Image: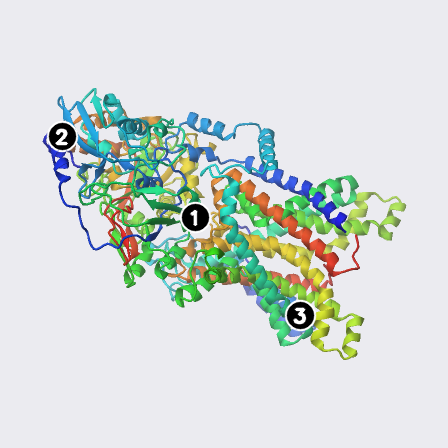
Amino acid sequence: MSHLSRRQFLVGATTTAAAVGMTAPRVHAQKKGGTIKFVPHADLKVLDPIATTAYITRNHAYMIYDTLFGTDATLAVKPQMVEKFASSSKGLRWSFTLREGLRFHDGQAVAAEDAVESLKRWSKRDPLGRLLAAHTARIAPVDRKTFTLELAEPFGLVLEALGKPSSNVPFIMPARLAATSENEPIKETIGSGPFRFVKDEWQPGNQVVYARNADYRPRAEKPSGSTGGKAVTLERVVWRYMPDHATASAALEAGEVDWWEHPPLDFVPRIEASSALTTFITDPRGTQGWIRPNHKHPPFNNKKARQALLSIVDQSKYLKAAIGVEKFYKTCPALFTCGGPFETAAGAPGTPDLDRARALVKESGYDGRPVVVLDPTDIALTHGAALVTRELLGQIGFNVDLQSMDWSSAVARRAKKEPPAQGGWNMLFTWWIASDVINPAVHAGISGAGDAAWFGWPESARIEELKLLWARATDPAKQKQLATEIQKVAYDEVLYVPFGQWVLPTAYRKAVSGVLEFPAPLFWNVSIG
Amino acid sequence: MLREIVRRLVATIPVMGVVAIAVFALLHVTPGDPAVIIAGDYATGEDIARVRTKLGLDKPFLTQVGIWLGGIARGDLGASIYSGLPVTTLIKQRAEATISLTLLAMLISIAVGVPVGVLAAWRRGSWLDRSVMIFAVSGFSMPTFWLGFVLVYVFAISAHWLPVQGFQSIERGLWPFLRHLILPAITLSVVYMALIARMTRASMLGVLGEDYIRTAFAKGLAPRRVLVRHALKNASLPVVTVIGIGFALLIGGAVVTESVFALPGLGRLTVDAIVRRDYPVIQGVILIVSGVYVLINLVVDVLYVVLDPRIKY
Amino acid sequence: MASSVPSVNTELAVPVIAERLSRGGRLRRFSRRNPTLMLGAAVMALIVISGVSAPVWWTGDPLAMRPAERLQAPSAAHWFGSDNFGRDVYTRTLYGTRVSLVVGAAVALASLVVGTSLGLVIGFHRRLDAVMMRVMDGLMAIPAILLALALMALMKGSVRNVIIALVIPEIPRVIRVVRASVLSLREHTMVEGARALGARTPRILVRYVLPALMAPLIVQATYICASAILFEAYLSFLGAGTPPHIPSWGNIMAEGKTYVQLAFWIILFPGVFLALTVLAVNLIGDGLRETLDVRG
């Protein structure tokens, strides 16, 4: 993620004003109207984007909400709802002014108060938000369209925080809804985004329907990622959830649906061979797979046991089982992703060494108790990773208790802090898109906050210390050095073990055009027919 | 007669009561907690406890039962824990697909099963009879979803004659409605069809052996007339029974068929709800489905009287 | 899960059977009169043998993953092809036989034992009868698969729990059958006579009622077995059956359903085995019904 210099901040304020005079962007001859039928990767269950980091909820939120800043295809942060912004007093005082013509779906104009309350609610949940809040002295509206943010200490990631592309995204909602406690889901789905949520046609487990928001005023620039003009061509967007991949594949081929978010990679050759279909990599930065041990309970509360785990992970083995198709994956030791600004191999494990692992297991004093490994079987990549892990752990002397369940149950179970025998767990698998792990501030796994950390709850004062230093550092070279140091400590403590990096293509009919490069599927700029 | 029907209707109430309590008990005696999922990724123990209180999940068991039953009396089945939509709305959204599927499947099964069973009985011992019986037994030995996939592969994917998935409401036209339903209905009907064919055959065999039938044949009446007018009428009793009992089979099959063909029906709704422990939805759907089943059996009982005047209440 | 069924000594069995057949006589006559039963029994025997002695039939390790060989069509290396993890479908299908047979037999046995005991008790106690029959009616009103699914949702996935979840919906049906027989037999002169002689209820149950129940119960058991085998497949298909690392036909097909267009063999072969097994059990049931001349 790029770090805007002070000069760039001020430039940003002025170019936005100039951009208004530019002619409207034109992409290609786009047919107006139409309905697109989209197959999402999961079923939409939770509507509140602050309550969960689930990507499906984030994708839903991108439809109906808007953000103060966005992230474009080069990972640069640019203003979206903000007209102009400025910082002063050595970056300790920021002021933001909203664009004209922004309205919520219920007709109310978007005010600075709405932005402030939304940010407050977001910052209670999101790790980067909490970091920002910890450095904030005051955030308040100045007038109807302007609010200020006063920092107590220097913080280098203000815009990165406001323009955060992925979970949790600081979406702006009406102040009365943002006033809902962060422990409760919001009751209404009113936003100011380019689409409206058609609640009457929502059939949980089957379909979600969005309609074009005719009152939305897009920016004048060309769209890029979540920045630029969100000009909507489509009249309706229908998300049809199909739990069966074979059904989705057949439906796409038959033209019964138009766009399939994440076809399993085994289907891609077939799709690419079809003359009516095409694939596209929407997020070339990729996704990272995680093996996360539970630091709270034996055996992985013992560092040697965790290091034993580290020395048996053979990324190519995992990738072959979890992903399967070689051209879409690669091994990568960097915790902040290969291809990202903080890529480094420092501290990474060498080739897998089973003997050393066995020795470490013995040294850790492992008492033979069952190791509870969560195996979500409905997600191919976690299921594959679980099966490989079971094999490997067994080979070095662990007694594995593989527990199969569906993803929702795994999500519920991973929240339990109890010992494995009482409903907890020892090991889980998950994945994050690059934007979510690209630097130490957004990375949910790089945390030593114990019980306040992401599931797995590692404790490391050193990591917390380094993170804070990183967030405050303004010099790119210092940031790089700190990030490298963080990775070394993270590997030493084995906060988690990455099992590789991959890209996922999306697939759609050739009649669909205008799909943007971004981790979430975006429906503005898209046309059909 | 009317009094008898009313009496039977009233008798179903305690039965439904048992169903309601059994279902409720089953779900609540359990590990697994929807509050955890709703509370979200960052929930602490207190957050989860707060959500549980909001959902009323922390009240004593009997109180929860009472609340639920009270709601039913008012026609309120509660609301989904996840979407917040009322259970009655969810059921209404999904009912059309399941009802259409089930009715069409039943129609096909009866339309094919009965004549086939009659034929087999009439030509007992012949190759026709043998093949019908083998087909019948194979029919209900096959897993429904397997047959569904085979049909989809042949008719939808390879031949492109029929759509792969989805459901079109009959409001949008009869032809699209049928097109989308024909493969799932056939898949679902095979089991039922087999059962009906067997039952019809067995029942017809019993009747055909009777004296009055042989008399009818001896009198020179056309075979078709004898078969349909006399034999079938008397043989229909057990067939009607099977239709009633088989309804439960149909529901079971519908659950799986809806999954294969991505039909937005009650079966899929229930499976999703069960996996996520969406208690109100699970309870509501099972209650309604069981209620329908009980009603169908009531109708079957009434049909008995109509078909066989010997049975008096 | 280890199914501790001893493997059949195939070397000895074959010559014995051959000798019996060549001697003809009773077996021949029996099979001519009961073709259904013999057909069913023959198919069943084949399946049981292949499952029980699975390691013998050129199988490998059902759990061994070979990602380099994933999704290969049937060939000399993989007779039934390989699945998405590179596991051999032939091996898994054969080992899956064990699970399905165990589930089928266990469910049939358990529901029979529990149902019969309960049915006998209920049949003999008038007051209990009225209450329990309402309860049974209620339970039977819930479609079996939904009940089984709901039960599985309560419990961790395992073969034992699948058996429990499948037994519970069957019990009311068995009770129904038993109770009907008991009610009619209760008034039977033989029983009345025994009563008059001072015989106590348990003795009556064992000496008179049970033997009369045997035949219909055995037939019922075969149908329960067949439907249990099918239901295990349904439960696994919906993701609520045997855990995935234990190969059962249901979950082989569940994992293979994604690959219907790409690797149809994953669903095809277990499906065929499943259909054949259930067919065989049904034929045995039909055959027994004919032989034992059971009605209803």
What subunit carries mark 3? Answer: B
Q: Above or below — where is A27 with respect to A105?
A: below
**Residue A252 picture quarter:** bottom left
Query: Horizontally, is C179 left or right of A40 in the view?
Result: right
The amino acid pointed to by label 3 is: Val
Query: For numbered disc 3, what is the local secondary structure?
Result: helix
The image quadrant that residue A114 belongs to is top left
- What is the C-alpha distance between the residues marked 2 and 1? 49 Å
From this viewpoint, which residue is outermost toward the left?
A: A7
Q: Position of residue B112 (x, y in %)?
A: 59, 67
In which quadrant will I find the C terminus of chain A?
bottom left
Residue drawn at x 58%, y 62% is: B107
Foreground mark, 2 or 3, reads 3
Work out whether disc 2 and disc 1 sit on a shared chain. yes
Query: Whole-percent x and y of residue B266?
Result: 52, 49
- Is A122 left, or right, of B150 in this rendering? left
Q: Tell me the CA gap for discs 2 and 3.
A: 88 Å
Looking at the image, which is closer to me, B2 or C231? B2
* Residue receiving disc 1: A206
Foreground residue, A189 or B249?
Answer: A189
Q: Is residue A411 visible?
A: yes
Query: Which residue is pictured at 66% across the width and 58% down the height?
Result: B242
Q: Chain of mark 2?
A: A
Category of crowding for the residue at label 3, using alpha-carbon neighbours closer than 10 angstroms: few (below 14), some (14–19), many (at least 20)? many
Regarding residue A400, the answer to whether it shows in the image is no
Q: Which mark is residue B118?
A: 3
Q: Which mark is residue A478?
A: 2
